[in-house]
Image (tube, helix red, strand yellow):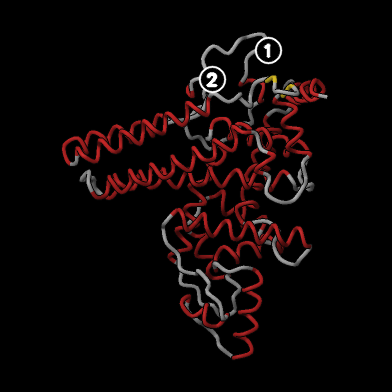
């Protein structure tokens, strides 16, 4: 089985899931993580590791020994996960046969609310733990590079950037699951999302997110440099400041989607670090008291509850606040409450995938249609 190409490119080309697995009659001779496709270290990550090891060898050999042990443990974990059946191959389970196509259809058709952990394949659940371990490992490497390896700020930052990039891959799993439940999306796009999710589960790497992560990270960094006056709570000036610093893709998203009320509400939640409900309450309080502007540190006292509006570069803060917005959006969706039912990340990733899908269809006009849908239908039929 070929590994997913780690080269970061802007254009996203959906890949037929069939291209990743061998013919049914071909025996699986080697289930090492490299052959199955679990990305232990990409070529770029391996380069970062070797660079850090070379520095620590002379500056802090005792720390190098600890790092090497952590990397060995990471590979052992990946090897153990590789022993579980590949999600990209036809697999005989205890009571049934699982094919990739049937798995795609199963993911799309499952529309229940709540935590889906026990409905996920074992390899998907285990792989999530592996990715968290890898994130922690690279964050430790960032601290080693900064404090023990005598690397300059730019060199050390590369380890933190890689940590943040993997955090976005962790977030992508939630985003894909959210979007696949959205029946306003075309079935083709929902199947594409399901394919992307399965490939992410198998490899713990995702090209779409690799392309989008720098934009989302830039938006986060821009947000933390803002000092919004929590007065009108409209976020207009803050949004303009954020957008000025972004690239074409983000600006297109703002121009084409910000007119949607839910997108605008999700944007305000992201910018202010408050829920839709808290924003409404704070607006009313400030209006009643005739207060035109307050600082971030005053928000909690006005609302009468602790609110985390401070912003840091810590990737854990980004993920923490994302999960709060994600959970709030899910509750509104389930209880039919006013406010955004998706996060800003959901809306942006949906926009990017729709743009890429439209471009691909435009580029393929006049060519022979792909047979990937036929494969999916055939595999789904086999599983019935």
Given residues 364 and 316, the one toward you in this image is: 316
Above or below, 100 against 154 in this view is above
Above or below, 351 against 279 in this view is above
Looking at marks 2 and 1 on the same chain, the residue that comes earlier in the sequence is marked by 2
Q: Which residue is mark 1?
A: 24
Is 243 positioned to the left or the right of 374 in the image? left
Mark 2: few/some/many CA within 10 Å (<14, 14-19, 20+)? few
Classify the position of the C terminus by image quarter. top right
Where residue 125 sits: x, y (%)? 59, 38
Where residue 36 sits: x, y (%)? 54, 22
Q: Which residue is mark 2?
A: 2
Residue at the image point whose x is 72% and y is 30% from the top:
103
Residue at the image point whose x is 57% and y is 70% from the top:
235
Is 196 positioned to the left or the right of 46 in the image? right
Residue at the image point whose x is 70% and y is 28% from the top:
364
Q: How many marks?
A: 2
Given residues 255 and 216, the one toward you in this image is: 216
């Amino acid at each position: 089985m070929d590994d997913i190409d780690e080269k970061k490119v802007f254009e996203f080309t959906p890949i037929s899931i069939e291209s990743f697995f061998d013919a049914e009659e071909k025996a699986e001779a080697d289930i090492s993580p490299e052959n199955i496709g679990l990305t232990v270290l990409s070529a770029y990550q391996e380069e970062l590791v070797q660079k850090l090891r070379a520095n620590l060898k002379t500056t802090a050999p005792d720390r190098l020994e600890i790092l090497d042990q952590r990397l060995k443990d990471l590979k052992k974990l990946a090897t153990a996960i590789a022993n579980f059946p590949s999600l990209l191959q036809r697999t005989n389970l205890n009571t049934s046969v699982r094919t990739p196509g049937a798995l795609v259809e199963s993911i799309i058709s499952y529309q229940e609310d709540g935590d889906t952990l026990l409905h996920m394949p074992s390899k998907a659940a285990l792989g999530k733990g592996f990715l968290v371990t890898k994130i922690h490992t690279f964050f430790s490497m960032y601290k080693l590079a900064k404090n023990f390896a005598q690397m300059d700020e730019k060199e050390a930052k590369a380890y933190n950037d890689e940590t943040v990039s993997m955090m976005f891959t962790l977030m992508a799993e939630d985003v894909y699951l959210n979007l696949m439940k959205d029946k306003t999306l075309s079935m083709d796009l929902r199947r594409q999302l399901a394919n992307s999710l399965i490939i992410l589960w198998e490899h713990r790497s995702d090209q779409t997110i690799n392309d989008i992560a720098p934009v989302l990270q830039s938006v986060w960094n821009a947000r933390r440099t803002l000092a919004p006056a929590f007065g009108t709570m409209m976020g207009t000036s803050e949004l303009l400041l954020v957008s000025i610093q972004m690239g074409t893709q983000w600006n297109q998203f703002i121009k084409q989607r910000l007119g949607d009320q839910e997108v605008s509400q999700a944007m305000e939640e992201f910018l202010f670090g408050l829920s839709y409900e808290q924003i409404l309450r704070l607006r009313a309080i400030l209006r009643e008291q005739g207060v035109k502007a307050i600082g971030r540190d005053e928000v909690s006292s006005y609302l009468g509850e602790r609110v985390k509006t401070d912003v840091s570069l810590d990737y854990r803060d980004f993920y923490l606040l994302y999960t709060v917005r994600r959970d709030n959006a899910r509750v509104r969706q389930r209880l039919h409450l006013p406010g955004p039912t998706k996060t800003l990340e959901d809306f942006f990733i949906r926009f990017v995938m729709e743009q890429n899908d439209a471009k691909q269809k435009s580029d393929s006009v006049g060519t022979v249609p792909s047979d990937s849908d036929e494969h999916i239908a055939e595999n789904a039929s086999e599983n019935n």
